[in-house]
Image (spheres, rainbow, N blue to C red):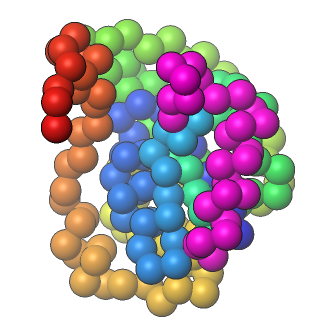
Amino acid sequence: MIYQILGWPRSRTAWLANFLTYGSSFCFHEGVLMRNQNRIRTVQEYRKLFTLYKTKYKYVGDSNTLALSKQKYVIPGARVVVIERDTKEVESAVYGLGYVVDIPEIIEYPYNENLIIKYNEINDNLKELWHFCLPNIPFNNERAYMLKNLNIQVQDVNEFLNIKLDV
């Protein structure tokens, strides 16, 4: 089964990717932006990524922001979770990192099967979100408790610092 978590930047999409990567589930964070020969994947390459990972995992997901503004990246038949966050909060959080984001005033969610959760209600709905994305994997209370307050900040350090790290 394929699932997608859609939300604007700073809406816990990276956190949810980590949370939902468990057992027979793997969740990308911004899989649509994975580099292939220094370019963004095409829609076809993005969909092929899910096919490849479905050979190893029962559930494959992507927690990303791009599909909210570019509907072509929504996988047909995927279960879709939309994280709603106040646009002013998003703009402020992104600006605090030194970036600017342009969010349309009207957002429509034309998905067949979806779950919409408010940003400030994610912790209260973790079990529902888990069962929606991973219906046959028992909810792990310990994992939820352990990760609930973890703040995950993902950045491409090489690009951000404009240096090459030899690791």
Residue 56 lies, in percent from the top left, at 59, 72
Q: Does the magenta stretch include residue 10?
A: no
Q: Is residue 55 magenta?
A: yes
Residue 158 lies, in percent from the top left, at 24, 22
Picture residue at 68% right of the left edge, 40% below the top: 46
Q: With 97 as the anchor, is 30 left or right in this view?
A: right
Picture residue at 45% right of the left edge, 25% below the top: 87
In this rendering, the count of numbered labels is 0
Residue 50 lies, in percent from the top left, at 67, 54
One can see residue 97 in this view: no
> In the rendered image of this protein, does residue 29 appear above or below residue 42?
below
Residue 5 lies, in percent from the top left, at 56, 50
Q: With 18 as the anchor, is 51 left or right in this view?
A: right
Q: Which of 100 and 55 is in front in this view?
A: 55
Picture residue at 56% right of the left edge, 29% below the top: 36
Q: Kindly give the residue lying farthest to the front in the view shown.
A: 166
Quadrant showing the C terminus = top left
Q: Quadrant of residue 1?
A: bottom right
Q: What stretch is highlighted in magenta?
A: 34-58
Q: With 82 as the anchor, is 88 left or right in this view?
A: left
Q: Which of 109 and 137 is in front in this view?
A: 137
> In the rendered image of this protein, does residue 11 appear above or below residue 100?
below
Q: Quadrant of residue 99?
A: top left
One can see residue 70 in this view: yes
